[in-house]
Amino acid sequence: MNLKTALLIGAALSVAPVFAQAPPAVQANPTVGCSATPAEMAANKKVVLAFFDPTQDRIALADPSYKQHNPAFKKRAEDEKISDYDEYKAAFGAGRGGGGRGRGPGGDGPRPPQGNQLEVVTAECDIVSVIHKGFRQDPTADPGKFYEVFTFDSFRVKNGKLVEHWDGAVINPPAPAGAAPAGRGGQ
């Protein structure tokens, strides 16, 4: 064995303990000790996908302990001094065509191309995430020119009910008088 080979082997052996002592993987799911089976995760996906089916009774899908992390929904609940669950019922209750506040078709004018609404659905323990493909009017172009956009919704499901929700929504500034509402802030 020559000196160069011996040095390479020695260097490799001195680094090996560093890799062996890597910290344990951090659990992405905030539910400590979750150990859902593939069948349970598939059932959780069905609950979440039912939420996006306009023919479903969305109120029946949520548990009264429902916790909302969408800031626009949270703000409405705080302003109205009601629970996250009561705001959920107000947004998705009967008489709203399943759409509720901030989820209906927007005004007149050019319509965006229709895409596959649900692009990706994943489940990890009790969390189900959905990535949506959509189209928005390009504000720098003529009306009718749209660009592709992706958004997400993540739900925690417990005992077959939605108990928590996250998304990338923001609170939008008020639209000028007579202007169309902006983006996805209320969803």
Image (cartoon, rainbow, N blue to C red):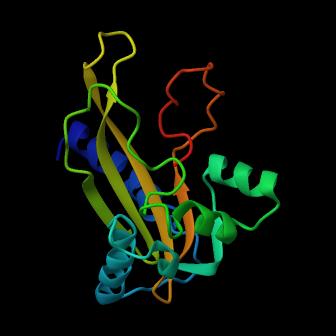
Residue 66: give x, y in percent of width and height: 63, 73
180 or 168, which lies in front? 180
Residue 69: give x, y in percent of width and height: 63, 56
User: In the rendered image, is residue 25 in sight?
Assistant: no
Vertical placement of residue 125 versus 133, above or below: below
User: In the rendered image, is residue 101 in sight?
Assistant: yes
Horizontal arrangement in the rendering, residue 65 relative to residue 163 (left or right)? right
- Residue at image point 34% right, 65% down: 54
Residue lying at the far left in this picture: please name it. 1
- Residue at image point 47% right, 34% down: 183
Horizontal arrangement in the rendering, residue 60 relative to residue 63 (left or right)? left
Number of marks in picture: 0
Horizontal arrangement in the rendering, residue 59 relative to residue 19 (left or right)? right
- Residue at image point 52% right, 64% down: 92
Give residue 49's quadrant in the image: bottom left
- Residue at image point 17% right, 47% down: 1
159 or 171, which lies in front? 171
Vertical placement of residue 1 versus 159, above or below: above
Residue 119: give x, y in percent of width and height: 24, 53
Residue 55: give x, y in percent of width and height: 32, 71
126 or 176, which lies in front? 176
Vertical placement of residue 34 versus 127, above or below: below
